[in-house]
Image (cartoon, rainbow, N blue to C red):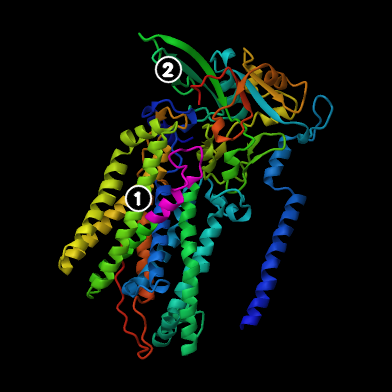
Amino acid sequence: MTTEMAASLAEHLEQITGFIYPNEVEIHWSILIVVYPYVTGLVAGAFILASLVKVFNVRAVQPTYRLALLTALAFLLIAPLPLNLHLGRPERAFEIFLTPNPTSAMAMFGFVYAWYLMGVLLLEIWFEYRHDLILLGRSTRGPLRWLYRALALFSNDVSPAALAFDKKAIRVITIIGIPSAFLLHGYVGFIFGSVKANPWWSSVLMPIVFLMSAIVSGIALVLLLYMVLTALRRRPIDMPCIDTISSYLFYAVIVDFSLEGLDFIHRLYESEESVGILGKLITLKLSMSLLVLQILLGMLIPLGMLVVAKSRHFNDDMRKLLYFTSAILIQIGIFATRWNVVIGGQLFSKSFRGLMTYKMELTGIEGLGVALVLLVAPFVILGVLIRLLPLERAETSSPSTERVPAPVVTG
Amino acid sequence: MNKRDFLKGAILFFPAGGLLALARDGARAAAPGPAREAEKAAAPEAPKPSGKRYNPADHYYGMGIEVEKCIGCSRCVEACKAENDVPAEPYFFRTWIERYTVRADGEVAVQSPNQRTRHVETTDDRDVIRTFFVPKLCNHCAQPPCVQVCPVGATFSTEDGVVLVDGERCIGCRYCIQACPYGARYLDPRTRTAGKCTFCYHRVVRGLKPACVEVCPTEARVFGDLRSKASRLVRFRRMNKLNVLKPALNTEPKVYYAQLDGEVR
């Protein structure tokens, strides 16, 4: 054991109140495991928003369709990294594919992830962009030309029949994609919800709460990105579009809030053996992150702002401001939700007699620095994706579509 | 590719996947993976002192603990650390002792003398109505949540009823640590893989007792084979009223406590 680790554990030991089992001093799932469900949730939520256009025919949100797909892809590419970096033996990560344990929820990760990436998201993006890629391949020169042709998998058919097939394929993939997105994030919730040893996690509502909060965070993120990118490209923001998105956001927050409220009331009312320690956990360890960040800042205030924005006849700028601010607050709230689940669930002893403390490292592989890099990386990837793949559909009549490359957004 | 070709391909492709999986399983059965090798390595080819070869199917191990006999000397903890090369720091234990002090007003103070470097004495105005020590270790559950959740099958139940970790396969995800209701697992900082009590499997298969049982001066720990009528554990189970830890979780522990106080979790 390194002296650094010994010092850190000694410090953790000092912070313990009450009695804990002696092996519980070390907090095993760190900030990286907070990042993982947060990032996966954004993927699932963004995809659900995209599917509104294709399956539920919500025309108003069409301007965000491609952005939502690319956002989902950018975050999905990063999603496995926090898990891998967190492993004690990352070089053995591939074992999860080679010898998966069929009774382990976690063993399904690789398969769910691979299915979602390759069976759903990449496929849908490819069909959506096939036409554009062919046209771009024809209109550009040099290595880019070859890149586009390769990305189009050298298909060259832009006949109306082929385009109609693309459209049909997208619809079918989206219909399969919605349950897949539910699976992707519901399953993350199941990983926590099925741990019977941990009363803070063990709840049948956990996958559903995860899913709803995923939808909330994904919609809010696409709303934010759309507003920022449109402003950066000096285009007018489509007000009906963001009005519609913020309505969906509002409903999703209401459902999410109700579910979490139900979970809370249920626990309090049943008042099982663990209720005492969980009460202490909330009041002594999570008052800031749960009561202030998650519930007040991340839910009640944005809900209020959305209600105000909907009920008063504000002008466009005021509504934009309210939407933008509430979407940012919601992001903070959902990150706090993940924190409270993952870290909160490890701050009390399974003897129900004591509380631990999590001291986040700043540097080091499981530290804040790496977590921030992992949270910024998807935006960099998204910037590259947007440069390559236009957010607006190519018109058949003008093959040399003018493209305005979007600047790389980092932050 | 037209629809017909596609369907033909699919009809061939999916069963082919199934055949591959069958072939893989067959190969694994023929040439055991590291998990089984670990089991084999521990189960020696060499005959036991009795002269008979070890057959795991003939045994099913468990442990009995007589709470009133434990004096909290922690020799078991030291013996375990020495025998099993458990990290010396007080954050890693395969077995440990808990000390309970129950006061007249119902307040319960629990400490683990193995963790705290100095004892916090419980002299207090209020009356102490009972005190006792409880040895803890992996319960080698018959329905182990740790085995259920391990994504790669690195932790497994042996035929003779012991829950082991294959250190060659463990990826260090720590899901098993989260899933264990008893806090019996830790991540070994040297190997970055999960560690836990093995019932001293390397000793047991040679007919020896686990180290903690061997050194206990008051015989508070009783190790035995539930399949052997002559086993001390079988007699222990017959002679005592028993309880297990957290029975409501239905993990079916095989560490049985006699005279267990309701305060112990």
Q: Chain of mark 2?
A: B
CA distance separating discs 2 and 1: 48 Å
A251 or A336: nearer the eye?
A: A251
Identify the residue under disc 2.
B118
**In this picture, which residue range is highlighted in magenta?**
A192-213
Q: Quadrant of the C terminus of chain A?
A: bottom left
Q: Which mark is residue A210?
A: none
Residue B56 position, x and y percent, is 76, 35
A238 to A101, vertically: above or below: below
A395 to A105, vertically: above or below: below
Q: Is residue B117 visible?
A: no
Label 1 crowd bin: few (<14), some (14–19), many (20+), radius 10 Å: few
- Are the two marked residues, 2 and 1, in contact with CB atoms closer than 8 angstroms? no
B221 or A252: nearer the eye?
A: A252
| Left or right: B130, with A230 as reference point | right
Identify the residue under disc 1.
A258
Q: Residue at x 43, y 78 (%)?
A: A129
**SS at mark 2?**
loop
| Left or right: A292, with B118 as reference point | left
Residue B121 painted magenta = no
| Left or right: B53, with A220 as reference point | right
Q: Residue at x 28, y 51 (%)?
A: A299
